[in-house]
Image: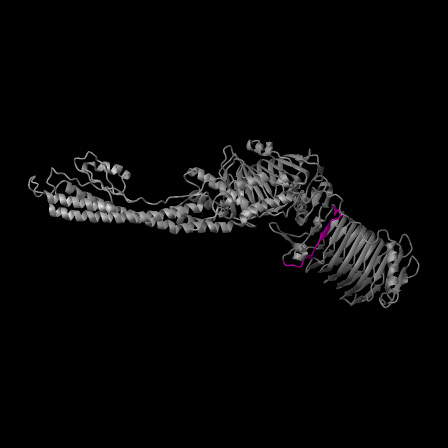
Amino acid sequence: MKKLANHIILSGVTVSMLFSPLMAIDPNKLPSGGKFTHGTSGSISGPYFDKNTGKNTIDITGKTQGGNHVIQWGGGFSIGKDAQVNFGKGQSGQNYLNIAHGASKSTIEGVLNAGGNNVFLINPNGVIIEKSGSIINAKNFMASTATLSDDDFNTFKNLSFENPQAFSPKIKPNSGNVVNLGKINATNSITLQGNKIVLEADFDKGSLNKIEANELNLKGNEVYADVGTTKVEKVNIEANNGTLYLSATGYYYDPKRKYDEFNNVKLDKTYNQYISIGSDLDWWHFAKGWNEKDDFRNNVVGDTFKLTNDIDFGASEGKNYANYCIDGLGCTSMIVGRTSDSAFKKTFDGQGYTLSNINIDTTVGEIKDKPLHVGIFGLANGASFSNINIDYMNGGIRHKVDETDKDEDIYAGGFIGSASNSKFYNMSLKNISNIYVEGSGDYVLAGGFAGEIKNGDFDRILIQDIGDIFGNLNSIGIAYAGGFAGFVNGGMYKNISMQNVKSIKVKSSDEARAGGFAGSVNGTFSDIYLDKLGAISASSEVSEWGSTNIGGFFGSVTSGTSVDKIYIYFDEGVEFTSQGAKENNIGKFVGRVIGSGIGSGIGSGIFSNIHIYHHENDLNNATADKSYWGNTYDKIQIHTYNNNNKDETYKDFENKINSIKDPSSPSITKPTEKDYLSAQEAKEQQATLTQDDLYESIVKDIFNSLNEHSYAIDLNTLQAFLEAYDKLSDTKSKEDFLANFLLDKSKYSEKERENLARSLVQSMDFILVYSKNDAKDSKFESGVEATFENLKDEAGKKHSDAKEQGKALRAYVESLINPVNSIKNNNGNIAGNNTEIKGLQDEYNSLVNSINKGLLDENELLIAQKRLGEIVANIEDLLGENKELKTTNDILLAQIESSHKDNFRTYGVSSSISETPTLSAVILNPGTNNGNDNNGDTSNGSDASQVVSSLQKQNSDKLGNAAVVEEEEKNEVDETSLMQKGKICIVSDNSKTMNPCIVGGL
């Protein structure tokens, strides 16, 4: 038999290599490599599918007297969205301290059910509770990124269930963050402790996720909390910096709440100044709340909404701003101020952030109630907008209302459908593929920025890169379209830049008005330039009375309008076209002047410093405003270019627009310091791990916990061993295997084996998953990563041999089957021989007894002599065979023992012992006839004596020396026979020596 190498069998850590831990993957991910330490014990059962919850589940049950349990998780502690972890199922009054090892954050996407116990989760890398995550049924819950000291472990060891706050480890700089987007429910307290604490509003299954407890403790260097995510009686916050804010999501679900529990917290508070919008989720609630709920509109703190992050509306992924759907919430229109009853009337500050990736399509069948006002905002009255970037990223607007009441108007703009008495400052709008508006009613109004503006106040606005703007009215009425707005009535407009508008088109059954800036205007306009403006066209289907007005800046303008410092540059090939109407007015600046007095008069309006640049072969039909052309500042100055002076002319245009104060773009910058840190930003930040964060001594103690145990294999259960080995699947099967087949039953009681097996399996799983850890989520102080990699390598070395070592052990056990079966077969043969020896012994003794009693005549003595000789010969053969069988067994047993010497013990099979026959003595008694029937006459006695003498000599020749004993001494022979092996003694009755006699041979 091949000797089993020491490094393969069960000494030391090698026992851990018998198994592989269960490694669930997302979305069934579960904490892995759990090991009870610090003198605590317990079971970790599963994973299993819980048909009641529909989740992949493990149960953690502490068995430590006193109820304080410490668990090290070698592969980290995370829960996938389809998974659940139960603590102390059926228990209460327990404290569970969980330490996540490795370099990854703990992410809770599923359910952590505390079962009425106190649960503490420690991970220096960070703890993230996602929107689908829930911490439920806790008495007290803590999530912390602290590093535990020996004192902290000692404190926990003596921790009272009723006073969990006594366990309060310290946070180090650059430790991980704690982020909550989910639900945390505790009957007493919740403590979140980390470098940065972020509580952000999110939802699951249609309802807002909240933290619910009597007491909320937030401890960190910085704390950013959406107060709308909390439902607590008392708040304790320890932080150097941070903000308490109210998001639109949080506000939506309880717009009347005052949050007085935060009054005494010494942090910046914005929840009583404005409502924050930092995600499409917030905007969904902002739009839905504003459009549908009076309380939402009427209780806005500070009358202000602020963007606090860039928001991507997913047009490139097929999302529709007009019917925006979020899983678990449903769909709503993101257009704020959708109807006249819900016109936006507050302040909206973009703070330099960007609304992007937008597509608005009201023509889809899912929208049954078509809006009339379409844009990022639909309708505003008395509102204020500032510091906003809008980037459609080549999304567009498609708005169509098939049938409306005669008095309904249809509005669409890149930012807003219709605005009255509102202010717009420091905004940019770009990359709109097209704006298409169609419908029936009195008016259709389409514009790059707005469909309609009444009494607007605009300053520092940039519009850039818009495709086609098209307004189409299918009924008798007026259609307006413009690069900035369809219709403008009153207000002041300055420092506005438009670049690269491809085309502006308008069509109506009656009147159609289109302009590079606006279809029709009244108001005051200054410091405005239009660069690389494209084609403008208008058409009317009623030639009898219809009219079209087209202008490079205004389609039409009414008296009282003032314009100053207006600059327009057209690329070569631009065209202004009109058709179908009775009256068609096309001008390079304005198509039609309605009213009188447009000119230099102050009271009636002023035209000054207007410059238009176009190719000399273009716009020859645009002469409606020719009476206003000239070369002085109070005239419309026309600059034409050709291929020879094109660049020079464009340079002149650039020089003139540079004279406009801040001409090219508004100054829209994000705050140098954000009001708050978003959950996404907090999740992306990396912790910096120190040596203490690795818990090196604890990890090595677990590595070494597999040493110095006693193992034994029962040679009678080899087949059962292999069958059980091949069926290893879950924690229970591993524990049972160790307890029943490997741990030495002579050293450990059943309970001790059960506890030790559980501990060993936990150590095995810890080691195996520890080797799989990576460092993608963390940074390290100098030298720490090397320590981490060394620990991984040490675990990995054990892990890398796991499969082969398991195979080797299995092969070894399998190799024992044949020799053990041989030993058992040999023992069976020895037993059969022993039975035969016993029968021969009995026959021999019976014959001797008959001889000694003189029951045989001379002929019978002769027959007995022959038979006794045969018996002795048979016994001798059987004893010889047994000796050979035992020798073979001894060799096999010695080989088995030598193959595992110093590693473990085998037991249960040994070599059988050969039967030791006890033969009665033949007594020569001269006082008896010994077969002579002559009543003592010795004349014939010589024959009997001769027979016996011959018999004795034959026995002596066959078996060596012999002993003859009296019948009544046979018991004594049996008791002492082991001392007289190998002899037959013949004694006379006159001898006083009564030595026992046995036949040996072993």
Q: Residue furthest right?
A: 632
Q: Tell me which colouring the rendered structure shows.
A: one colour
Main secondary-structure element of the magenta-colored stretch: loop
The quarter of the displayed image where residue 1000 is located: top left
The vertical placement of 524 against 991, above or below, is below
Q: Position of residue 40 (x, y in %)?
A: 52, 36
* Residue 583, percent from left and from top: 82, 66
**Residue at figure coordinates x 67%, y 50% from the top left:** 280
Note whether residue 726 is visible.
no
Q: Is residue 622 left or right of residue 338?
A: right
The x, y position of residue 343, in whole percent, is: 72, 49
Q: Is residue 362 left or right of residue 46?
A: right
The stretch drawn in magenta includes residue 331:
no
Q: Is residue 561 above or below residue 299?
A: below
Q: In the depicted view, which residue is nearer to us: 562 or 58? A: 58
Q: Quadrant of residue 398?
A: bottom right
Residue 81 in view, yes or no = yes
Q: What is the total number of numbered labels drawn onto the structure image? A: 0
Residue at (44% x, 39% y) in the render = 753
Magenta part of the chain: 348-365
Work out which quarter of the rendered image holds the C terminus and state it.
Answer: top left
Q: Quarter-wise, where is residue 916 in the image?
A: top left
